[in-house]
Image (cartoon, rainbow, N blue to C red):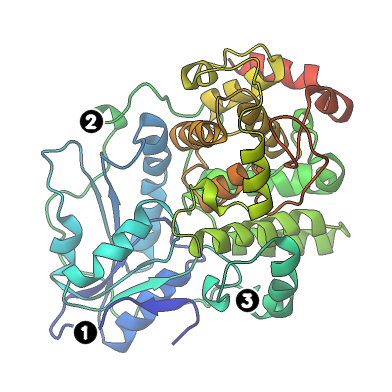
Amino acid sequence: MNVRVRLLNNKPIRPQAKYVLYWAQMNRRVESNHALAHAVALANEHGLPVLFYEGLACDYPFASDRLHQFVLDAVPHTEKRCHKLGLGYFFYARKNAQSPNDMLYRLAADAAAVVTDDYPVFIATRHNLTVPERIDIPYYVVDSSCIVPMNLFEKREYAAYTIRPKINRVLSQYLVPVERWKVNVPFRYELPAGHGAVSPAECDIDHSVAPSKLYPGGRKAAEKQLEEFLLENLRRYARESNQPAGRATSCLSPYLHFGHISSLEVALAVKEYAAEYKLVADEFLEQLIVRRELAFNFARFSPNPQSIDNIPNWALETLRKHASDIRSPQYTREQFEAAATHDALWNATQNELLITGKTHGYYRMYWGKKIIEWSRTAEEALATMIYLQDRYALDGRDPNTYTNVLWCFGLHDRPWTERAIFGMVRYMSFDGMKRKTDVPEYIRQVAALG
């Protein structure tokens, strides 16, 4: 079997089925999708069409107008692409607790098999643990999130320097486009009632978190974001990616998280553009491939990727040693959430998250370090960080979210000089940010967003 594919039950293919069902939980796209390609291959083998199914619940953690709208923005393009390629398309949104909650099982009742996304966190993990034994057909999960398949790694890697050579040894084998496919049998069945997009206002979700002012969702927005990065920022990335006010990063993380574009597509486009214009893209590809896939590896082999117990022993011990150190000032979760600290840079970083659903990665490190410094305990700081990222970030609820948050506590890092509160965990200061970045310009930019 393909190394990207896992069969999570031992059920037989249903005879006289109507179709193969692809359930797009996390990779909500037609293009460059290994899971969809597997569903098509399975359907062609059995002389069946493919039904592409997307669901949108009203009760997933932190369901809000922001997250709902980002998903809904993608629906028209996905439906159009499915129909053009001969796939069926079904989108079902639960508006409230009274709406039917069995659509997957109703669709699976006519399917030969279910194919879905292999994803190590959030609701996909829960579904992939519970659904396979509740259906009487094969349930395949396919990794279409990573370039080098997660299944190639047998254990959790310690840091980037341990996973990098393993990735580089096989990267050329996997850094190739998804094989083009064609459905042999077009989908022609009538869909059940319930298909159709809704507006967030119709759903029983958190309406206090507004859609992003900067990042619309969907395939077209993802392609536009990639094109802008290639044309305007790739040549600046190595020099300016750690200058938040310079805006030299790709800003693709929301689209990668929701699966509107794949890291494979991005890597191939960057390599091609860099070769054509004689640019060096190594720094960007390090982040996109090595660092991102280190995060997926961490989440895959961690029973609870949100636990502080995941950090190295040296980090746990040093934080415990300094647990009673005086913290002044101290802020509550509500004060952090409202960007109500004494630090103008920290407040600007939080306000960018509140307004746009995203923050620059370099300042996000500072943001996290200061939450540790100003919280009563390390555990309280971790809970605050995860809450703020999961609720407001378009790229939250993701392996990268939990890895980057825990990096602030020493994950995938090394011991530094010992100091109060942090012990030997890396410290970041406002003075350091002033020396290295244009703090006033960044604060001005965020104020203009508001």
Residue 231 vs 117, above or below: the answer is: above
Quadrant of the drawing holding the N terminus? bottom left
Does residue 252 show up?
no
The residue where tag 3 is placed is: 174
The residue where tag 2 is placed is: 204
Residue at the (27%, 27%) spot, across then down = 201
Mark 1, residues whose alpha carbon is within 10 Å: few (<14), some, or many (≥20)? some
Residue at the (44%, 59%) spot, across then down = 303
Percent position of residue 370, x then y = 66, 27
**Which callout, 1 or 3, points at the residue further toward the start of the chain?**
1
Question: How far is mark 2 from mark 1, CA to CA?
Answer: 37 Å
Q: Nearer the viewer, residue 190 or 125?
A: 125
Snapshot quadrant of residue 440: top right
Disc 3 residue type (three-letter) = Tyr
Residue at the (66%, 34%) spot, across then down = 322
Question: How far is mark 2 from mark 3, CA to CA?
Answer: 42 Å
Indicate left or right for 228 with 98 as reference. Answer: right
- Check residue 13 in the rendering and tell me which mark sits there, or answer none: 1
**Which callout, 2 or 1, points at the residue further toward the start of the chain?**
1
Percent position of residue 434, x then y = 84, 23
Quadrant of the drawing holding the C terminus? top right
Residue at the (50%, 49%) spot, across then down = 398
Q: Does the residue at mark 1 contact the one at mark 3 (Cβ under 8 Å)?
A: no
Does residue 295 show up?
yes
Disc 1 residue type (three-letter) = Ile
Percent position of residue 144, x then y = 49, 66
